[in-house]
Image (cartoon, grey):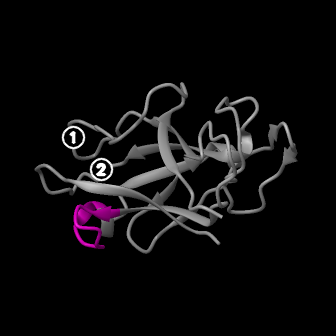
Amino acid sequence: MPAPAVSWYKTDNVTALPKWEIGTIDAGSTSPALGVLIWNNRGGTSDLSTMTNCTITTKDSAGGDTGELVTNTWIEVRVDSMGETGFTKIGGSVTKAIQAGGNTVNATGTYSPNTKEILGVANDGSIANSKGNFAQVTLQANVPATATAGNVNFLTRVAYQYV
Protein backbone atom coordinates (compact mmCIF):
# COMPACT_ATOMS: atom_id res chain seq x y z
CA MET A 1 0.00 0.00 0.00
CA PRO A 2 1.33 3.51 -0.79
CA ALA A 3 2.74 5.67 2.02
CA PRO A 4 0.48 8.09 3.92
CA ALA A 5 0.03 11.60 2.48
CA VAL A 6 0.09 13.93 5.48
CA SER A 7 -1.19 17.50 5.26
CA TRP A 8 -1.98 20.17 7.83
CA TYR A 9 -5.00 22.51 7.54
CA LYS A 10 -6.61 25.12 9.71
CA THR A 11 -9.90 23.96 11.23
CA ASP A 12 -11.80 25.69 8.40
CA ASN A 13 -10.54 22.74 6.28
CA VAL A 14 -9.78 25.22 3.48
CA THR A 15 -6.53 26.91 4.46
CA ALA A 16 -3.38 24.80 4.19
CA LEU A 17 -0.98 25.31 7.08
CA PRO A 18 2.62 25.00 5.84
CA LYS A 19 3.95 26.66 9.02
CA TRP A 20 2.77 28.04 12.33
CA GLU A 21 3.40 31.78 12.57
CA ILE A 22 3.08 32.37 16.32
CA GLY A 23 4.44 35.92 16.32
CA THR A 24 5.82 37.66 19.39
CA ILE A 25 4.84 36.17 22.74
CA ASP A 26 5.99 37.92 25.89
CA ALA A 27 7.68 35.82 28.56
CA GLY A 28 5.08 34.70 31.09
CA SER A 29 2.31 34.70 28.46
CA THR A 30 0.41 32.18 26.37
CA SER A 31 -0.02 32.53 22.60
CA PRO A 32 -3.39 32.49 20.90
CA ALA A 33 -4.58 28.92 20.33
CA LEU A 34 -4.34 27.46 16.83
CA GLY A 35 -6.72 24.72 15.70
CA VAL A 36 -5.23 22.23 13.23
CA LEU A 37 -6.52 19.28 11.21
CA ILE A 38 -3.75 16.74 10.58
CA TRP A 39 -4.94 14.79 7.54
CA ASN A 40 -3.93 11.51 5.95
CA ASN A 41 -4.96 11.27 2.28
CA ARG A 42 -7.22 14.36 2.35
CA GLY A 43 -9.70 14.00 -0.52
CA GLY A 44 -7.83 10.97 -1.83
CA THR A 45 -9.58 8.84 -4.47
CA SER A 46 -7.67 5.65 -3.65
CA ASP A 47 -6.58 4.10 -0.37
CA LEU A 48 -3.19 4.85 1.20
CA SER A 49 -1.58 3.29 4.26
CA THR A 50 -3.02 4.07 7.68
CA MET A 51 -0.83 6.10 10.02
CA THR A 52 -0.38 4.07 13.23
CA ASN A 53 1.15 4.87 16.63
CA CYS A 54 0.69 8.59 15.91
CA THR A 55 2.29 11.12 18.26
CA ILE A 56 3.00 14.85 18.18
CA THR A 57 5.95 16.75 19.66
CA THR A 58 8.32 19.63 18.95
CA LYS A 59 11.91 19.55 17.71
CA ASP A 60 14.53 22.23 17.25
CA SER A 61 14.92 23.67 13.75
CA ALA A 62 17.48 20.96 12.88
CA GLY A 63 15.17 18.15 14.03
CA GLY A 64 16.95 17.62 17.35
CA ASP A 65 15.99 17.90 21.00
CA THR A 66 17.84 21.09 22.01
CA GLY A 67 16.79 24.62 22.93
CA GLU A 68 14.57 26.03 25.67
CA LEU A 69 11.32 25.66 23.76
CA VAL A 70 11.88 21.93 23.25
CA THR A 71 13.62 20.94 26.49
CA ASN A 72 11.30 23.02 28.70
CA THR A 73 8.15 21.96 26.78
CA TRP A 74 6.77 25.42 25.99
CA ILE A 75 4.32 24.06 23.40
CA GLU A 76 1.06 22.56 24.59
CA VAL A 77 -1.45 20.44 22.67
CA ARG A 78 -5.07 19.46 23.19
CA VAL A 79 -6.32 16.59 21.02
CA ASP A 80 -9.85 17.72 20.19
CA SER A 81 -10.62 14.61 18.11
CA MET A 82 -10.06 12.56 21.30
CA GLY A 83 -12.47 14.76 23.29
CA GLU A 84 -9.75 16.30 25.46
CA THR A 85 -10.45 19.50 27.38
CA GLY A 86 -7.00 20.22 28.84
CA PHE A 87 -3.60 20.90 27.31
CA THR A 88 -0.53 18.64 27.54
CA LYS A 89 3.05 19.94 27.30
CA ILE A 90 5.15 18.45 24.47
CA GLY A 91 8.76 18.72 23.36
CA GLY A 92 11.54 16.38 22.25
CA SER A 93 10.99 12.95 23.76
CA VAL A 94 7.87 14.23 25.56
CA THR A 95 5.18 13.28 23.04
CA LYS A 96 1.38 13.14 23.00
CA ALA A 97 -0.66 10.42 21.29
CA ILE A 98 -3.07 11.68 18.64
CA GLN A 99 -5.79 9.91 16.72
CA ALA A 100 -8.78 10.46 14.49
CA GLY A 101 -12.10 11.02 16.20
CA GLY A 102 -14.67 9.20 14.12
CA ASN A 103 -15.51 7.15 11.06
CA THR A 104 -14.89 7.73 7.39
CA VAL A 105 -17.74 6.86 5.06
CA ASN A 106 -17.09 6.31 1.36
CA ALA A 107 -18.58 4.31 -1.54
CA THR A 108 -17.08 1.03 -0.26
CA GLY A 109 -18.21 1.29 3.37
CA THR A 110 -17.65 2.79 6.79
CA TYR A 111 -14.15 2.68 8.26
CA SER A 112 -13.19 3.17 11.91
CA PRO A 113 -9.71 3.99 13.16
CA ASN A 114 -8.14 2.20 16.10
CA THR A 115 -6.30 3.88 18.97
CA LYS A 116 -3.46 6.21 17.82
CA GLU A 117 -4.47 5.84 14.13
CA ILE A 118 -5.34 8.18 11.28
CA LEU A 119 -6.89 6.26 8.39
CA GLY A 120 -5.64 6.44 4.82
CA VAL A 121 -8.84 5.24 3.13
CA ALA A 122 -10.30 7.12 0.17
CA ASN A 123 -12.49 10.04 1.27
CA ASP A 124 -14.21 13.17 -0.01
CA GLY A 125 -12.09 15.53 2.11
CA SER A 126 -15.06 16.84 4.08
CA ILE A 127 -15.02 17.01 7.86
CA ALA A 128 -18.47 15.40 8.08
CA ASN A 129 -17.68 12.26 6.03
CA SER A 130 -13.95 11.82 6.70
CA LYS A 131 -13.51 11.91 10.50
CA GLY A 132 -11.32 8.80 10.41
CA ASN A 133 -8.81 10.50 8.11
CA PHE A 134 -7.75 13.38 10.37
CA ALA A 135 -6.82 14.22 13.93
CA GLN A 136 -7.90 17.62 15.22
CA VAL A 137 -5.57 19.34 17.66
CA THR A 138 -5.24 22.75 19.26
CA LEU A 139 -1.72 24.12 19.78
CA GLN A 140 -0.48 26.98 21.93
CA ALA A 141 2.84 28.27 23.22
CA ASN A 142 3.02 28.79 26.98
CA VAL A 143 6.21 30.80 27.44
CA PRO A 144 7.57 30.85 31.01
CA ALA A 145 8.47 34.13 32.69
CA THR A 146 12.13 32.99 32.82
CA ALA A 147 12.41 32.45 29.04
CA THR A 148 15.41 33.93 27.25
CA ALA A 149 14.43 36.76 24.90
CA GLY A 150 14.85 36.35 21.14
CA ASN A 151 13.54 34.52 18.10
CA VAL A 152 13.00 30.78 18.46
CA ASN A 153 12.62 28.55 15.41
CA PHE A 154 11.25 25.06 15.93
CA LEU A 155 9.36 22.23 14.26
CA THR A 156 6.04 20.71 15.25
CA ARG A 157 6.36 17.06 14.28
CA VAL A 158 3.94 14.17 13.92
CA ALA A 159 5.59 10.75 14.12
CA TYR A 160 3.85 7.59 12.91
CA GLN A 161 4.38 4.14 11.49
CA TYR A 162 2.77 2.47 8.48
CA VAL A 163 2.86 -0.79 6.59
Q: Residues within 10 Å of mark 2 (few under 14, many from 20)?
A: many
Q: Is residue 68 left or right of residue 80?
A: left
Q: Closest to the observer: 45 or 101?
A: 45
Question: Where's residue 123, x and y in %?
Answer: 71, 38
Mark sitting earlier along the chain (1/2): 1
- The residue lying at 36 percent from left, 48 percent from top is 142
As drawn, the label of residue 26 is 1
Q: Which residues are magenta?
A: 59-69
Disc 1 versus disc 2: distance between alpha carbons? 7 Å
Query: Residue 63 colored magenta?
Result: yes
Residue at the disc numbered 2: 143
Q: Closest to the observer: 83 or 115?
A: 115
Q: Is residue 153 left or right of residue 16?
A: left
Q: Closest to the observer: 18 or 65?
A: 18
Tell me, yes or no, whether the two marked residues, 1 and 2, touch with CB atoms within 8 Å: yes
Q: Which quadrant, please, contains the C terminus? A: bottom right
Question: Where's residue 161, x and y in %?
Answer: 58, 71
Q: Magenta residues: mostly which secondary structure?
A: loop
